[in-house]
Amino acid sequence: MTVLVAFATHSGATRTLAETLAAALRADELEVDLVDIAEDPDPSSYDAVVLGSGVRIEAIEKPAAAWAQTHRAQLAGRPFAFFSCSGSAADPAKGGTQKATDTFLARFPVSPVAVKNFPGWVLMDRIPVHERVLLTSMRTPTGDFRDLPAVEAWGHEIAPLLRG
């Protein structure tokens, strides 16, 4: 069984989550290709697809949303899972929810077999100046909030769902 793990990242945190997820799926004996959305992978040759996207200013990455819309028919025809990565997901007040994910999925015509919002990082040296100003004005906490064991656990959890 082949799985495409496609991701869109802005500062690199989503890539690290996608790598961890791919390793967990491989450990569960799935054949996994890990591909950046920038390479425009064709999902039609895979049995299942996982899409991961960073979150920027309350929206998933535009390339991820555009790729998903372009390939919605192929995604609808196989098990599909989605995850997001953002520094704000570390906020306990959010209770694991993410406005960007909810908005994207509400407008997307494919129902995923699994969805997860993971904390990422907010590292000012990896963020454009105009976004730094906004994040600073919002008093956004900075740091590396990734929980790679949680990503690995989710990979093991969704492996049977991706098998269908």
Image (cartoon, rainbow, N blue to C red):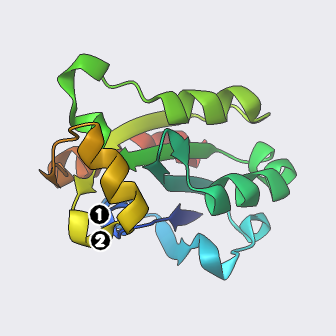
The image quadrant where one finds the C terminus is: top right
- In space, the residues marked 1 and 2 are separated at their CA atoms by 21 Å
Instruction: Give the amino acid type for the residue marked by disc 1 in the picture.
Output: Thr
- 58 over 148 or under it: above or below: above
Can you tell which mark lies on residue 34? none
Residue at the image point whose x is 52% and y is 64% from the top: 8
Q: Give the labeled residue for mark 2.
A: 126
Q: Earlier in the sequence, mark 1 or mark 2?
A: 1
Q: Give the labeled residue for mark 1.
A: 20
Residue 73 location in percent, x, y? 86, 49
Estimate how packed mark 1 is, as few (under 14), some (14 to 19) or many (20 or more) residues with alpha carbons within 10 Å.
Answer: some
Helix, strand, or loop for circle 2?
helix
Residue at the image point whose x is 55% and y is 43% from the top: 59
Which one is nearer the viewer's eye here, 100 or 47?
100
Decide if residue 148 is on the left or right side of residue 17. Answer: left
Residue 47: in sight, yes or no?
Answer: no
Residue 20: in sight, yes or no?
Answer: yes
Extreme bottom residue here? 39
